Image (cartoon, helix red, strand yellow):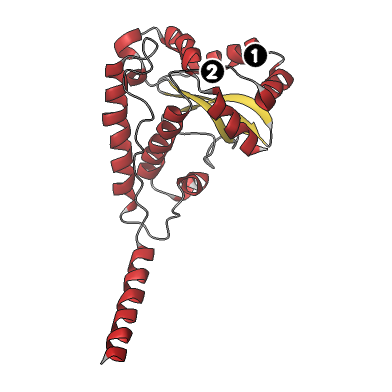
Amino acid sequence: MKTRNNIISSCALICFSLTVSGNPPVFKQQPLPYAYSALEPHIDALTMEIHYSRHHAAYTKNLNDALQSLSDVPANIEDILRNISKYPVAVRNNGGGYYNHKLFWEIMSPAGGNISGKLAEAIRRDFGSFDAFKEAFEKAASTRFGSGWAWLVSDKGKLTVTSTPNQDNPLMDIAEAKRTLLLCIDVWEHAYYLKYQNKRPDYIQAFWNIVNWRRVSSLYENSL
């Protein structure tokens, strides 16, 4: 009887494992690494609360909903984005929204910080100076028509600035140039309109005060 029960238990475990492995992954919204008010006065608490608890939460839920009818979905969101052309548009929009915001929260910090090390050297090498890099990044962010993102990206260590519409990003196989993401700014109006109204350039200027350069540097060194 004991042997029979063990066999039944083993079969049940195998069947359960097969069932689980066939299910799409469930992506979770990570806790915000600081309080809603922590980035003030540069980004106000109400904007942060709405942005995180409504917009990002909705992208997370809608991504999971969009994956429910699919099979053989990678458990890594980056693998999904790298092959996004194979997925429905709902996965592209919500997968981008989920991942872009996840990175956005990480590369901001109440303490800000100073750029140094290998990243600082690479910026001087590829842009000529930090001020020239800032000018290029601000231009990409301010001239992005409608909603989207501006990015600092790495191609095996070489840095460039680019922008993408909507919730696309340079990881995606539909992007003009596929790169490793290092730094981003959300230029959808919901990211800044409560405080800055239509003054997107003011929001972009304020962003430099809260960039978490330690995190950006870490992402850069991992891209080498």
Image side of residue 49 versus residue 105, left or right: left
Q: Residue at x 34, y 39 (%)?
A: 29
Report x, y in % for residue 132.
Answer: 65, 12
Q: Looking at the picture, tell me which residue is in the foreground, 71 or 115.
A: 115
**Distance Cα–Cα, label 1 vs label 2:** 14 Å
Residue 7 position, x and y percent, is 32, 86
Q: Amino acid at mark 1?
A: Phe
Nearer the camera: disc 1 or disc 2: 2
Residue furthest to the front in view is 2
| Image coordinates for residue 163, horizontal then vertical, percent | 52, 25
- The first of marks 1 and 2 along the sequence is 2
Residue 197 visible in this rendered orientation of the protein:
no
Q: Quick one: SS at disc 1?
A: helix
Classify residue 82 as left or right of residue 92: right
Q: Residues within 10 Å of mark 1 (few under 14, many from 20)?
A: some
Q: Nearer the viewer, residue 2 or 109?
A: 2
Q: Which mark is residue 130?
A: 1
Kindly indicate whether the residue at mark 2 contacts the one at mark 1 (C-beta within 8 angstroms).
no
Q: Is residue 76 above or below residue 171?
A: below
Within-10-Å neighbours for mark 2: few <14, some 14–19, many 20+: some
Kindly identify the amino acid type of the residue bearing the numbered disc 2: Gly
Above or below for 132 versus 169: above
- Residue 50 visible in the current orientation: yes
Q: Which mark is residue 113?
A: 2
Residue 175: name its quadrant. top right
Residue 133 sits above or below residue 122 on the image: above
- Give residue 15's quadrant in the image: bottom left
The x and y percentages for residue 100 are 44, 33
**The C terminus sits in image quarter:** top right
Position of residue 33 in the picture relative to residue 156 (left or right):
left
Judging depth in this view, the residue of 169 and 51 nearest the camera is 51
Residue depicted at 43% across the width and 37% down the height: 99
